[in-house]
Image: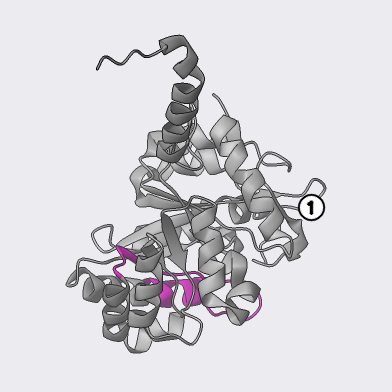
Amino acid sequence: MKYSFNVVALLPCLIVVLSTINARSKETGIGPSFKGPIGLQLYSLREQFAKDVPGTLDKVRDWGFKYVELAGTYKLTPEEFKKELDARGLTAISGHFGFDDFAKDPEKIAQDAKALGMKYAGCAWIPHKGDMDEKALRAAAQVFNSAGEVLAKHDIKFNYHTHGYEFQPYGSGTLFDLLMAETNPEFVCYEMDVFWIVHGGQDPVALFKKYGDRFELVHLKDMKQGTPINLLTGHSDVKNDVALGTGRIDYPRILPAAQKAGVKWYFIEDESPTSEAQIPVTLKYLENVKW
């Protein structure tokens, strides 16, 4: 028996199949210029996680993320949280831990980070009263170096997440310059939070040019138009976080500078109460932005 096929009649079906395959293979948040890799800082959904860990991770997966950065495991052990991530094809690249924990027991952090499969373990806040000063910063640098050396034995790298208060004037530069000078590049790298750099009155592009590959990670978030800057507090209303491309930060200028500096990982962080609505907008922006 002979069979004949009408190729023309089959074309619409073939187009649908090929489009579906292409859609599935397309990486979320990646476009003609921005190549990532892109992940989500799970702190963006902290209120949702507090109520429903599995359901919230489902949302992260459904947005198309493959990589995440943690800020706690919401009453689950590291091993339990890792199983939840694995079940959804999510990989924990980095996580934030408390400064005091790095100072007192970096080995415990290393074990937890290792159980979660992390490449990085970071600190996002240096305790201080009033304005950041030289004494507090030098003490923090010692903690970072020591913790970084402990983590390195487990093939995990320490990172410090900028928060804006580090840009107090110091000598011919800032306390941030001192922190860079006092931390060992072998054990300590940095995560630039673009929002906090701009909030502190600094230029992300200039910092990428100055410190190059010491910035291995970046937090992407935009700032609502009219938000005050040139502040060294490390504090801002979370409602000032807006989707990329809708705020005052010039990302078409910043993203290529980050790429040139050799940034290895990018994470969307949206602390606003409307993060669920804004995260897809940010992803779409990254898929379409060009430079």
Q: Quadrant of the C terminus?
A: top right
Task: Name the residue carrying label 1.
Answer: 227
At x 47%, y 35%, the residue is: 23
Q: Would you say 54 lies left or right of 122 here?
A: right
Above or below — where is 265 with respect to 142? Answer: above
Farthest left residue? Answer: 153
Compared with 260, 53 (above or below) is: below
| Residue at horizontal 50 percent and vertical 71 percent from the top | 134
**72 horizontally vs 272: left or right:** left
- Which residue corresponds to the image point at 38% horizontal and 64% vertical from the top-left? 94
- The colour scheme used to paint the residues is one colour
Q: Does the magenta segment cover residue 177?
A: no
Q: Position of residue 202 (x, y in %)?
A: 60, 47
The residue type indicated by label 1 comes to Thr
The quadrant of the image that shows the N terminus is: top left
Q: Which residues are magenta?
A: 117-141
Q: Is 218 in front, or is 141? A: 218
